[in-house]
């Protein structure tokens, strides 16, 4: 079997209400949908984050990918990496991750087996997700508006009622630390038996992290995620606060793991089906974490249905992953697959159809492609209510 063509479609799907975090506002999700055609008529689908630049990155690989065998993607990936070095271009892991996703979809369809089987087999039929809780601006149709601890608890009750979650993740770094601490206190009182995790996306200094997380110890926190910036900062916090620390900011590639292990600055690494380089790479990450007694969770960056399917297949195939993955799915107003995922008891069923087990809804793909063209993506994270505000945390 040979790949004969790649098709890329950037899309933008709005959030139900704008989500606030330490770097600004998530008003929607901009993704690139990939379709990989083969000479045998099988089309594989993939998805990754980013819009026009991501699509250009994928298209730049077309010449190298054409004629390769989707069953042998790891060989192709090595060639792509050499190509990127030799031509002084850069194709990020989240770009090749979409290619791998589509190739696994092709292989699964060719063999009539789900992707979870290609990853070694599923260890569970459903994957529970965390209720991702954001302070939100109000939408024009009256949704959102959670700007206080009390309103966040009310919102959480509604999500738990509607979707059946029993793990809560509060996105912080938005209100003053005392109010976010108060939110955690109220959530713990309202949901005494739930796991509760907290993620201010590195908005806090080391001293604020130590002082606030020490007070948070009273509320039985599953983990604090990236309270402060960098391996050094996280190590200082970890030294003074006996609370598990997780990251999807300071350890985001294999090269950073040895230092993280030596310093023990974190307890849990959040995998990601995109920036860790794809599903095979995530399986390698799981092995490293298991070896060094580092916990494994899963990050979310506003996945639509294709990437959500990849998340679910991967999580089902990783028995070592003991933390419920994150997902923005319940915040998104729509999806571009024909049968969107449905939460049952806070979990998604592992698709059992061939490949990823999901199919593109052509009408919705066209609709959200038009929206991407109309809205662009330059201001994706900008805060429309605070146009002069910029985040103060160091980015690079
Ligand atoms: Mg995070």
Image (cartoon, rainbow, N blue to C red):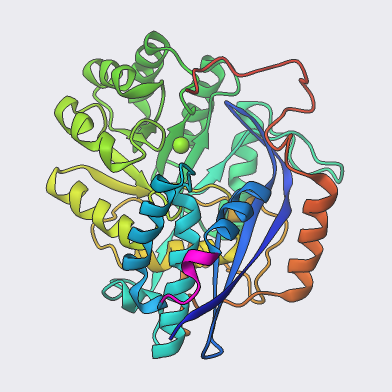
Question: Between residues 182 and 329, which one lies in front from this camera angle?
Answer: 329
| Residue found 58% across the figure and 69% down from its top | 341
- Viewer-proximal residue among 118 and 161: 118
Near-viewer residue (159 or 246): 246
Residue 248 drawn at (x, y percent): 40, 38
Q: Does the segment drawn in magenta span residue 336?
A: no
- Taking the image as shown, residue 202 lies to the left or right of residue 331, namely left
Is 319 positioned to the left or the right of 182 in the image? left
Residue positioned 33% across, 41% down in the render: 253
Question: Is 59 on the left-hand or right-hand side of 290?
Answer: right
Q: Which residues are magenta?
A: 63-68
Residue 47 to residue 30: above or below = below
| x, y percent for residue 330 | 62, 55
- Residue 289: image location, x then y, percent: 21, 47
Quick one: which residue is furthest to the top in this view?
Answer: 207
Q: x and y percent of residue 28 in the render?
A: 70, 46
Residue 271 seen in render? yes
Q: Is residue 129 left or right of residue 360?
A: left
């Amino acid at each position: 079997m040979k790949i004969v063509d790649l098709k890329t479609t950037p899309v933008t799907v709005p959030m139900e209400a704008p989500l606030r975090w330490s770097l600004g506002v998530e008003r929607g999700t901009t993704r690139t949908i990939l379709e990989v055609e083969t000479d045998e008529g099988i089309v594989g689908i993939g998805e990754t984050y980013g819009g026009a630049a991501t699509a250009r990155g994928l298209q730049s690989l077309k010449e190298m990918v054409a004629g390769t065998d989707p069953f042998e993607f790891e060989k192709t990936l090595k060639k792509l990496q050499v190509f990127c070095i030799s031509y002084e271009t850069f194709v990020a892991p989240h770009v090749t991750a979409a290619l791998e996703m589509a190739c696994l979809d092709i292989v699964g369809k060719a063999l009539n087996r789900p992707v979870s089987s290609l990853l070694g087999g599923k260890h569970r039929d459903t994957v529970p997700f965390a209720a991702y809780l954001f302070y939100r601006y109000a939408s024009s149709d009256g949704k959102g508006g959670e700007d206080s601890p009390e309103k966040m608890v009310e919102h959480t009750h509604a999500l738990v009622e509607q979707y059946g979650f029993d793990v809560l993740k509060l996105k912080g770094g938005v209100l003053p630390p005392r109010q976010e601490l108060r939110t955690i206190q109220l959530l713990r009182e309202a949901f005494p038996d739930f796991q509760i995790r907290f993620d201010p996306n590195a908005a806090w200094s080391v001293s604020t992290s130590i002082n606030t997380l020490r007070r948070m110890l009273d509320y039985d926190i599953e983990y604090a995620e990236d309270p402060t910036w960098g391996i050094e900062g996280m190590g200082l916090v970890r030294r003074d606060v006996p609370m598990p620390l997780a990251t999807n900011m300071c350890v985001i590639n294999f090269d950073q793991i040895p230092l993280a292990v030596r310093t023990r600055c974190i307890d849990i690494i959040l995998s990601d089906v995109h920036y860790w380089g794809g599903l095979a790479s995530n399986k390698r990450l799981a092995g490293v974490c298991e070896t060094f007694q580092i916990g494994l969770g899963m990050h979310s960056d506003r996945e639509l249905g294709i990437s959500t399917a990849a998340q679910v297949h991967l999580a089902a195939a990783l028995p070592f992953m003991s933390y419920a993955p994150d997902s923005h799915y319940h915040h998104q107003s729509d999806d571009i697959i024909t049968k969107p995922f449905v939460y049952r008891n806070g979990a998604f069923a592992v698709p059992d159809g061939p490949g990823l087990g999901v199919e593109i809804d052509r009408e919705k793909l066209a609709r959200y492609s038009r929206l991407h063209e109309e809205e662009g993506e330059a201001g994706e994270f900008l805060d429309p209510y605070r146009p002069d505000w910029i985040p103060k945390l160091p980015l690079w």
